[in-house]
Image (tube, rainbow, N blue to C red):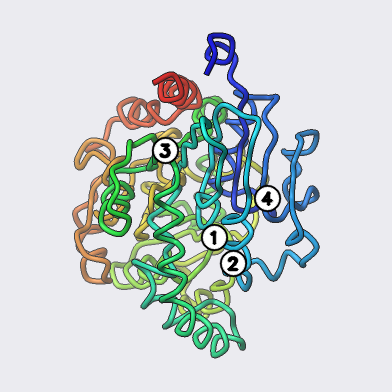
Amino acid sequence: MSSEADSNPRIALVCDWLTEIGGAEQVLLELAKIFPEAPIYTSQYRPRSATKFQGKRVITGRLNILPRALRKFIAPLRAHYFNHLYLTGYDIVISVCNAECKGIKVASGIRHIAYLQGPPTQYYWGMYDQYIANPGFGKLNWLARFGLRVLVKPMRRSDWRAAQRPDALLANSHYVADEIKRYYGRSSQVLFPLAQIDQIKLASQQVKAKDIRQIRQELFRGGDFYVVAGRQVNWKRFDLAIRACLETGENLLVIGSGPENNSLVKLAGDSSRIKFLPKYDGVGEIVKYYRSAKGLIFPSLEPFGIVPVEALASGLPVLAFRRGGSADIIRDGANGLFFPEQTVDSLAEGIKRFNVAQFKHDQVVKSAERFSAEHFRKNIKQIIEQ
């Protein structure tokens, strides 16, 4: 690049899809704030669902004509789209990738940095067996299983080739970095994603003692309770939290919604110890529940895990499954505890060991600060300048 380009590089951003706002989209949004002139290339864009990107220059292709609901069905088409997307006229391209967009091609002299938001495309690699067992397509599970079994070998080859194209790979946790090395044979640099640390800390400061008493009284007649939060999908294992709390006699508030909601409600039965909160009104309300709880249960094997970071930022210690991104977030005995196996017995034993009095509120809050937007901005700029 020229000296002028070095000081003011022409940057393009890429993501798999923009049909909702999840963790990867939050990272992309922050990058769009850092580089406001950068266009965003993606396969599908729905402005009404991804409202925070309105006003940005979002560039799509033919896949955008397909309904949003087909997103899970079109992985081979999406791989084909990105594998044939050729970008020119930029100095740096940053792809924020959950699945296929790392496979883009760039002209000679363009530096492509792929920031992987999870392990190598999980339905081809590490979680293939879980997807075969429960693809998540309801009555069409049989068709999804058939398609995945037929296509998995050629798609693995395609996915591996795609992962060799970027000049540099970033991983959002050390767990993801290990998986990248295992399946793609490449080294990667760890860059933690960002959470809404400042907003949560501000909201937490506004929670009063009377708010906490009111929430506890309304939910469990003044009793302590645990929280499990997030999208209710099978691999997040909310069922473990419900079963373990029923076994140990602990109260549990299940926050969120998703395709597993009906089965979780059925699992809880008529127990007064399990309550559900499908919707909440933004950061301010969920922080009130975090401040009122004794701990967050995090039973998932996740690449990173924004939920436990946001809980810590509010001062709530976390009881987490030891594997995955939680190993980068939890300091055993300082801001939470680990349970070693993804089983009811292991989690129940962790609940019995969990003593909220051992955790210092200020220390728990401080442990989340390294996942702030300020830290993310500083680190991504250093990477780009390398």
Q: Specify few, some or many for label 3: CA neighbours under 10 Å numbering under 14, 14-19, or 20 or more.
A: few
Q: For the residue marked with disc 4, what is the amino acid?
A: Leu
User: Quick one: 79 or 316, which is closer to the camera?
Assistant: 79
* Residue 61 against residue 96 in the figure, above or below: below
The dot on residue 18 is 4
Q: Quadrant of residue 343?
A: bottom left
| Image depth: mark 2 or mark 4 in front | 4
Q: Which residue is mark 1?
A: 231
Closer to viewer: mark 4 or mark 3:
3
Q: Amino acid at mark 1?
A: Arg
Between marks 3 and 1 in the image, the one whose residue lies nearer the viewer: 3
CA gap between label 1 and label 2 equals 5 Å
Disc assigned to residue 120: none
Is there CB contact under 8 Å for labels 1 and 2? Answer: yes
> How far is mark 4 from mark 3, CA to CA?
24 Å
Judging by the rendered image, the residue that carries numbered circle 3 is 167
